[in-house]
């Protein structure tokens, strides 16, 4: 009896029809897109904060540390 027991964890994908495969693919793509969009706003916010800091730092130190052109033409 143990030899006739099927493993229900395995799915035979060859029995799925093409429309079912397309629906599953669409659901997977929507899930991936939803995951990405919830991650992108916090990452974009961090990059914006970092870039703003770099620009302010550059602006402040470019005025005080930039070498002046003292050559006489």
Image: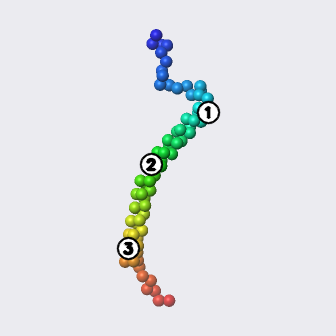
Residue at 42% x, 68% y is: 55
Rendered image: mark on residue 38: 2
Q: Position of residue 71 (x, y in %)?
A: 46, 86
Kind of element beneath mark 2:
helix
Direction bottom: furthest residue: 73
Q: Position of residue 64 (x, y in %)?
A: 37, 77
Q: Position of residue 44 (x, y in %)?
A: 44, 56
Residue at 39% x, 65% y is: 53
**CA gap, disc 2 to disc 3?**
35 Å
Mark 2 neighbour density, 10 Å: few (under 14) some (14–19) many (20 or more): few
Q: Nearer the viewer, residue 16 or 5?
A: 16
Direction right: furthest residue: 18
Kind of element beneath mark 1:
helix
Residue at 59% x, 28% y is: 16
Mark 1 neighbour density, 10 Å: few (under 14) some (14–19) many (20 or more): few
* Relative to 63, 32 lies left or right: right
**CA gap, disc 1 to disc 2?**
29 Å
Direction top: furthest residue: 1
| Disc 1: which residue | 19
| Disc 3: which residue | 60
Q: Nearer the viewer, mark 2 or mark 3?
A: 2
């Amino acid at each position: 009896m143990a030899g006739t027991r099927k493993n229900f964890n395995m799915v035979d994908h060859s029995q799925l029809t093409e429309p079912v495969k397309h629906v599953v693919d669409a659901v997977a793509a929507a899930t991936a897109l939803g995951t990405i969009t919830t991650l992108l706003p916090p990452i974009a916010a961090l990059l914006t904060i970092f870039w703003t800091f770099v620009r302010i730092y550059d602006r402040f130190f470019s005025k005080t540390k930039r070498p002046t052109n003292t050559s006489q033409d």
